[in-house]
Amino acid sequence: MPYLNSPVVPAGTLARVPQPSLPGGDGLLLRPWQAKDAPAVYAAFQDPLMHQWHIRSADSEQEVADWIAQWQSCWTDECQAQWAVVDADTDELLGRVALRQILLDDGCAEVAYWTVARARGRGVAVRATTTLSRWAFEEIGLHRLELSCWPPSCSSARSSAPCPTRSACSCANASRSSASTPSCCCR
Protein backbone atom coordinates (compact mmCIF):
# COMPACT_ATOMS: atom_id res chain seq x y z
CA MET A 1 0.00 0.00 0.00
CA PRO A 2 1.55 3.35 -0.97
CA TYR A 3 2.07 6.15 1.53
CA LEU A 4 -0.12 9.22 1.10
CA ASN A 5 2.64 11.64 2.08
CA SER A 6 6.31 11.98 1.34
CA PRO A 7 8.75 11.28 4.17
CA VAL A 8 9.35 14.27 6.42
CA VAL A 9 13.10 13.62 6.23
CA PRO A 10 14.34 11.62 3.22
CA ALA A 11 16.26 8.42 3.85
CA GLY A 12 19.98 9.02 3.51
CA THR A 13 19.88 12.47 5.07
CA LEU A 14 22.17 11.36 7.91
CA ALA A 15 24.06 8.52 6.25
CA ARG A 16 25.29 10.51 3.27
CA VAL A 17 27.33 12.91 5.44
CA PRO A 18 29.76 12.44 8.32
CA GLN A 19 28.28 13.00 11.76
CA PRO A 20 28.94 16.65 12.63
CA SER A 21 30.33 18.19 15.77
CA LEU A 22 27.91 20.75 17.18
CA PRO A 23 29.22 23.75 19.15
CA GLY A 24 27.02 24.30 22.18
CA GLY A 25 28.34 27.66 23.29
CA ASP A 26 29.71 28.47 26.73
CA GLY A 27 32.55 25.99 26.28
CA LEU A 28 30.41 23.00 25.35
CA LEU A 29 30.87 20.78 22.28
CA LEU A 30 28.80 17.85 21.04
CA ARG A 31 31.10 15.60 19.03
CA PRO A 32 30.91 12.08 17.62
CA TRP A 33 32.05 9.36 19.99
CA GLN A 34 35.64 8.17 19.69
CA ALA A 35 37.24 4.91 20.84
CA LYS A 36 39.36 6.91 23.31
CA ASP A 37 36.16 7.83 25.22
CA ALA A 38 35.70 4.29 26.58
CA PRO A 39 37.56 4.81 29.90
CA ALA A 40 35.61 8.00 30.68
CA VAL A 41 32.24 6.39 29.84
CA TYR A 42 33.15 3.35 31.92
CA ALA A 43 34.01 5.65 34.86
CA ALA A 44 30.72 7.55 34.42
CA PHE A 45 28.76 4.31 34.65
CA GLN A 46 30.41 3.44 37.98
CA ASP A 47 28.44 6.33 39.55
CA PRO A 48 25.59 4.81 41.62
CA LEU A 49 23.23 7.58 40.48
CA MET A 50 23.59 6.41 36.89
CA HIS A 51 22.15 3.06 37.98
CA GLN A 52 18.92 4.79 39.01
CA TRP A 53 18.29 6.08 35.50
CA HIS A 54 19.73 3.49 33.16
CA ILE A 55 18.96 -0.13 32.48
CA ARG A 56 22.57 -0.78 31.45
CA SER A 57 25.65 -1.12 33.58
CA ALA A 58 29.21 -1.13 32.33
CA ASP A 59 31.23 -4.11 33.46
CA SER A 60 34.40 -3.27 31.55
CA GLU A 61 36.03 -0.72 29.30
CA GLN A 62 35.83 -3.29 26.49
CA GLU A 63 32.05 -3.45 26.89
CA VAL A 64 31.90 0.34 26.64
CA ALA A 65 34.18 0.27 23.59
CA ASP A 66 31.63 -2.05 21.98
CA TRP A 67 28.84 0.42 22.85
CA ILE A 68 30.80 3.23 21.22
CA ALA A 69 31.30 1.18 18.05
CA GLN A 70 27.56 0.52 17.99
CA TRP A 71 26.77 4.22 18.55
CA GLN A 72 29.04 5.08 15.62
CA SER A 73 27.34 2.58 13.28
CA CYS A 74 23.87 3.81 14.25
CA TRP A 75 24.60 7.09 12.43
CA THR A 76 24.88 5.37 9.06
CA ASP A 77 21.91 3.13 9.89
CA GLU A 78 19.92 6.33 10.64
CA CYS A 79 18.32 4.72 13.70
CA GLN A 80 20.15 6.74 16.38
CA ALA A 81 22.54 9.67 16.59
CA GLN A 82 24.76 9.80 19.67
CA TRP A 83 27.18 12.53 20.74
CA ALA A 84 29.76 12.87 23.46
CA VAL A 85 29.20 16.12 25.33
CA VAL A 86 32.65 17.50 26.08
CA ASP A 87 34.39 20.62 27.33
CA ALA A 88 35.31 22.44 24.10
CA ASP A 89 38.75 23.42 25.43
CA THR A 90 39.89 20.27 27.24
CA ASP A 91 37.80 17.55 25.53
CA GLU A 92 36.84 16.30 29.04
CA LEU A 93 33.72 14.13 28.89
CA LEU A 94 30.74 15.85 30.52
CA GLY A 95 27.96 13.58 29.29
CA ARG A 96 26.05 12.18 26.37
CA VAL A 97 23.14 13.43 24.30
CA ALA A 98 21.34 11.44 21.64
CA LEU A 99 18.48 11.12 19.25
CA ARG A 100 17.10 7.62 19.69
CA GLN A 101 14.36 5.81 17.83
CA ILE A 102 14.71 8.11 14.84
CA LEU A 103 11.76 7.81 12.46
CA LEU A 104 12.72 9.84 9.42
CA ASP A 105 9.44 9.20 7.58
CA ASP A 106 7.50 10.66 10.52
CA GLY A 107 10.11 13.30 11.34
CA CYS A 108 10.42 12.37 15.00
CA ALA A 109 12.92 11.03 17.50
CA GLU A 110 13.41 10.60 21.22
CA VAL A 111 15.99 12.71 23.06
CA ALA A 112 18.19 10.98 25.62
CA TYR A 113 20.96 12.36 27.78
CA TRP A 114 23.11 11.78 30.83
CA THR A 115 25.82 13.78 32.56
CA VAL A 116 28.83 12.73 34.58
CA ALA A 117 28.67 13.51 38.29
CA ARG A 118 31.04 16.50 38.17
CA ALA A 119 29.00 18.12 35.37
CA ARG A 120 25.60 17.96 37.10
CA GLY A 121 24.01 21.19 38.20
CA ARG A 122 25.99 23.23 35.65
CA GLY A 123 23.36 23.37 32.90
CA VAL A 124 25.20 20.86 30.73
CA ALA A 125 22.07 18.80 29.96
CA VAL A 126 20.05 21.92 29.15
CA ARG A 127 22.68 23.32 26.79
CA ALA A 128 23.34 19.95 25.14
CA THR A 129 19.67 19.16 24.53
CA THR A 130 19.02 22.69 23.28
CA THR A 131 21.95 22.46 20.85
CA LEU A 132 20.87 19.04 19.64
CA SER A 133 17.24 20.10 19.29
CA ARG A 134 18.08 23.17 17.24
CA TRP A 135 20.22 21.05 14.93
CA ALA A 136 17.51 18.37 14.63
CA PHE A 137 14.80 20.89 13.80
CA GLU A 138 16.74 23.41 11.72
CA GLU A 139 19.36 21.30 9.93
CA ILE A 140 17.77 17.87 9.62
CA GLY A 141 14.13 18.93 9.49
CA LEU A 142 12.61 16.78 12.21
CA HIS A 143 9.16 17.93 13.34
CA ARG A 144 8.91 16.35 16.77
CA LEU A 145 11.26 15.38 19.59
CA GLU A 146 10.15 13.46 22.65
CA LEU A 147 11.79 13.28 26.05
CA SER A 148 10.85 10.43 28.36
CA CYS A 149 11.51 10.72 32.05
CA TRP A 150 10.95 9.02 35.36
CA PRO A 151 8.07 10.94 37.05
CA PRO A 152 10.09 12.10 40.08
CA SER A 153 12.58 13.51 37.56
CA CYS A 154 10.06 15.48 35.50
CA SER A 155 11.54 18.71 36.84
CA SER A 156 14.82 17.58 35.26
CA ALA A 157 13.00 16.89 32.01
CA ARG A 158 11.41 20.33 32.09
CA SER A 159 14.78 21.99 32.63
CA SER A 160 16.30 19.94 29.80
CA ALA A 161 13.34 20.36 27.49
CA PRO A 162 14.33 19.99 23.85
CA CYS A 163 11.69 22.51 22.84
CA PRO A 164 11.87 25.83 24.65
CA THR A 165 8.13 26.37 24.13
CA ARG A 166 7.11 23.05 25.69
CA SER A 167 5.44 23.87 28.96
CA ALA A 168 4.13 20.60 30.34
CA CYS A 169 5.31 17.16 31.19
CA SER A 170 2.39 14.80 31.41
CA CYS A 171 2.87 11.81 33.66
CA ALA A 172 -0.81 10.91 33.82
CA ASN A 173 -0.30 7.76 31.79
CA ALA A 174 3.00 6.70 33.33
CA SER A 175 4.06 3.22 32.39
CA ARG A 176 6.77 0.86 33.58
CA SER A 177 9.92 0.58 31.51
CA SER A 178 12.04 -2.53 31.23
CA ALA A 179 14.02 -1.18 34.19
CA SER A 180 10.82 -1.34 36.30
CA THR A 181 10.84 2.40 36.75
CA PRO A 182 7.85 4.52 35.81
CA SER A 183 8.30 6.77 32.81
CA CYS A 184 6.35 9.50 31.10
CA CYS A 185 6.59 11.30 27.82
CA CYS A 186 7.24 15.01 27.55
CA ARG A 187 6.29 16.64 24.27
Image: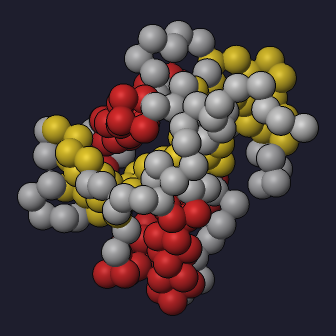
Kindly identify the residue that appears in the image at 62 percent across and 71 percent down.
Answer: 57
Q: Is residue 87 left or right of residue 111?
A: left
Given residues 78 and 33, the one toward you in this image is 78
Q: Is residue 127 left or right of residue 82?
A: left
**Could you say which is closer to the camera, residue 139 or residue 119?**
139
Up-down relation of residue 56 to residue 112 (above or below): below
Q: Residue at x 82, y 54 (%)?
A: 178
Quarter of the N terminus within the rendering: top right
Image quarter hosting the C terminus:
top right
As displayed, is residue 168 above or below residue 100? Answer: above
Which color scheme does this rendered protein use? Answer: secondary structure
Q: Is residue 95 visible?
A: yes
Residue 63: x, y in percent?
56, 84
Q: Looking at this view, is 5 or 65 the one in front?
A: 5
| Whether residue 112 is visible | no
Q: Position of residue 82 (x, y in %)?
A: 46, 57
Please state if 54 lies on the left or on the right of 91 as rendered. Answer: right
Image position of 25 with respect to 187: above or below? below
Picture quadrant of residue 179: bottom right
170 left or right, relative to 24: right
Residue occupying image coordinates x 54% and y 25%: 143
Q: How many marks on residues?
A: 0
Residue 157 locus on image (x, y percent)? 53, 29
Q: Measured from the top left, where is residue 29 in percent x and y?
A: 23, 51
